[in-house]
Amino acid sequence: MVDSQCVWIALVAAFAVAFGADAGAQRQPASEVPVVVDYVNLPSTLEDAVSRADVIVRARVSDPQVRTRTPGGSAVPNVVVVNTVFKLDVIDLLKRREGTPDPKEVMREGGELVTDKGARRFVEDAFPMFDTNEEYLLFLFWNDYLGTYQPAFGPDAAFRITPEGLLKGLGHGPLAKRESGRGALEVGDRIRQRAALPQPEKRQ
């Protein structure tokens, strides 16, 4: 799928492989399957990130729910895409592009799929899953096709907010390196000021 702000390709290994036939697998730890997502055009500055995100929120994530779907037109039989959707308890709405819905949830690639034949945990490379009931600063884009918000730049779109009120980037790109360690309130003020300026048209 091509997003207007970044191109990302999810390559999920072993989706077409049947789950283990041994019923005893239920008692075994979930096996891990890598989900490789290639994010390009990462933002290098906070100003760039603000201009490209549809929504920016400081929010507490909760109530993770695994959802599965079968991509339309897939040439590979038995392909199932596993996602985890988190509820967003918004603390501060720093930006919302006109015409986008209220941010009530965010969807992540991967998650743990449990069946009567065992469990598999689909893990996105270098993007740890959100910790439930923790606060995050999130740069999101609205996915029209799926009808939900997703991180706009992969792990570089997410910062955990520590109990001391500091940002800890989940990514390793320029934005994460620049803003990690800064105060969440200070960065929030900068985001709000930048978002108040005229915004460029969303690229198609």
Image (cartoon, rainbow, N blue to C red):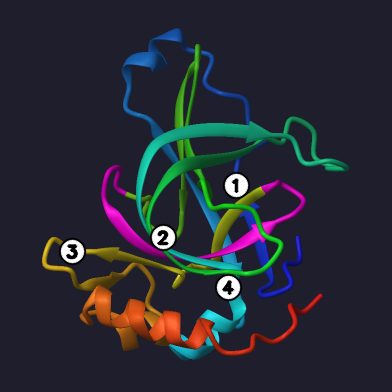
Q: Which residue is mark 3?
A: 162
Instruction: Give neighbour class at mark 2: few <14, some 14-19, many 20+ (Cα, 10 Å).
Output: some
Residue type, numbered disc 4: Ala
| Residue position for label 2 | 127
Q: Amino acid at mark 2?
A: Phe
Q: Is residue 48 magenta?
A: no
| Cα gap from disc 3 to disc 4, whole angstroms | 23 Å
Distance between mark 1 and mark 4 Cα atoms: 29 Å
- Label 1 vs 4, first from the N-terminus: 1
Q: Tell me the quadrant of the picture where the C terminus can be found.
A: bottom right
Farthest-out residue, front: 196
Mark 2 or mark 4: which comes first in sequence?
4
Kindly indicate the quadrant of the structure image that contains residue 40. Answer: bottom right
Check disc 3: other Cα within 10 Å, few if <14, some if 14-19, many if 20+: some
* Spatial CA span between label 3 and label 1: 33 Å
Earlier in the chain: of badge 2 and badge 3, it is 2
Choose mark 2 or mark 1, whichever is in front.
2
Mark 1 vs mark 4: in front: 4
Left or right side of 193 for 36: right
- Numbered disc 3: secondary structure: loop
According to the picture, the residue beneath numbered tag 4 turns out to be 53
